[in-house]
Image: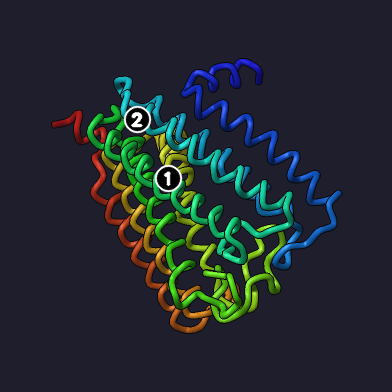
Amino acid sequence: MTNVLRRATHWNRPLMFFVYVMAVLAVVCAIGVFVDSRVLVGAPIWLKPFKFAVSFVLYGVTLAWMLTLLPQRSRAAEWAATVIVAMSVIELVVIVGQVVRGQTSHFNGTSALNSALFSVMGAAIMVLFLAHLLIGIVVLIRRIPDRAAATAVGWGLGLSLLGMLAAVPMVLPMQEPGIDGISGAHSVGVPDGGAGLPVLGWSTAGGDLRIGHFVGLHALQALPILAILLSRFAGRLDERTRARLVVVAGAAYGVLTVLLTWQALRGQPLLRPDAGTLLAVAALVVATATASGLVLARRSRPELALAA
């Protein structure tokens, strides 16, 4: 285990140092959930920084690993990774600082300081978005040798950008709850802070824009994991077929992200879909299964290639 951690440290030093710091922060926040009785917007006050810390651990590890797949070192990608670390630190400092003050970090314009801090977070996220986009461009230009891995990394980076964009409706005028100083919300049709799923907190009474945001962001882990599983357990498939299956999965994942955001925008709880949502999900499942079947039917067969 020590050897694994030592090797991982060399993937990208700024990203991995950030990951280790976030892991420690996650433990501190987890303790805070149990020892600090304060509740903010219907949830333990330390739960939000805990979730952000865990998410950044996953994000940082995945991004650092992806950079090792590039055939040549890219200064632009390494610079962008350092910018991502800096912007992430800014966001976490604001979130934790607001928890210490007993204030919410998001949508909070109840004072000049709270408004300024929320604006700083917004600016940091925009810079992070652009740095993340730059890494995606580098990955496309510097072709990763393994075709399936390259496809998974490219789609993962692109869909995580889609996940970031899925958060935009949270700050649109339609999400102003009519509370003085509050300029957005993640729930639709119900006030923030109501009944929600355990730990995640996603609303069980109305729509919740965090769901599509969460799913989209974690394409960065889901698709590379799929590529690894295909390599390990479907080794008889040729590289092109595995890459095509990743494309099918990526397209389905993107549609699912949009579908979950659409469901939330209609004020519909995740676990109480209406007929329209169920029909859309069924169509997505059928389309994905059909596309996967067609890819497998057209796969290159090693024995035929040898005979030729």
Residue 285: x %, y % from top left: 41, 66
Circle 2: residue type: Ala
Q: Are marks 1 and 2 in contact (CB under 8 Å)?
A: no
**How many labels, in total?**
2
Residue 148 as seen in the image, left or right of residue 178:
left
Residue 201 as seen in the image, left or right of residue 163:
right
Residue 226: x %, y % from top left: 44, 43
- Does residue 294 appear in the picture of this structure? yes
Q: Which element is circle 2 on?
A: helix
Q: Residue at x 57, y 72 (%)?
A: 187
Residue 239 as seen in the image, left or right of residue 65:
left
Of the 4 image quadrants, the one containing the N terminus is top right
Which residue lies under the disc numbered 1? 223
Q: Residue at x 71, y 52 (%)?
A: 99
Instruction: Give the vertical position of 130 relative to 278 (above or below).
Output: above
Of the 4 image quadrants, the one containing the C terminus is top left
Which residue lies under the disc numbered 2? 77
Residue 307: x %, y % from top left: 17, 30
Quick one: label 2, few (<14), some, or many (20+) residues within 10 Å? many
* Most foreground residue, 306 or 288: 288
Instruction: Give the vertical position of 10 relative to 97 (above or below).
Output: above
Q: Which quadrant of the structure image shows residue 153?
A: top left
Q: Which element is circle 1 on?
A: helix
Task: Please name the colour scheme applied to the rendered image.
Answer: rainbow
Q: Residue furthest left?
A: 308
* Most foreground residue, 97 or 76: 97
- Does residue 270 appear in the picture of this structure? no
Q: Which mark is on residue 29?
A: none
Circle 1: residue type: Leu
Instruction: Give the vertical position of 280 relative to 214 (above or below).
Output: below
Q: Residue at x 51, y 83 (%)?
A: 274
Precedes in sequence: disc 1 or disc 2: 2
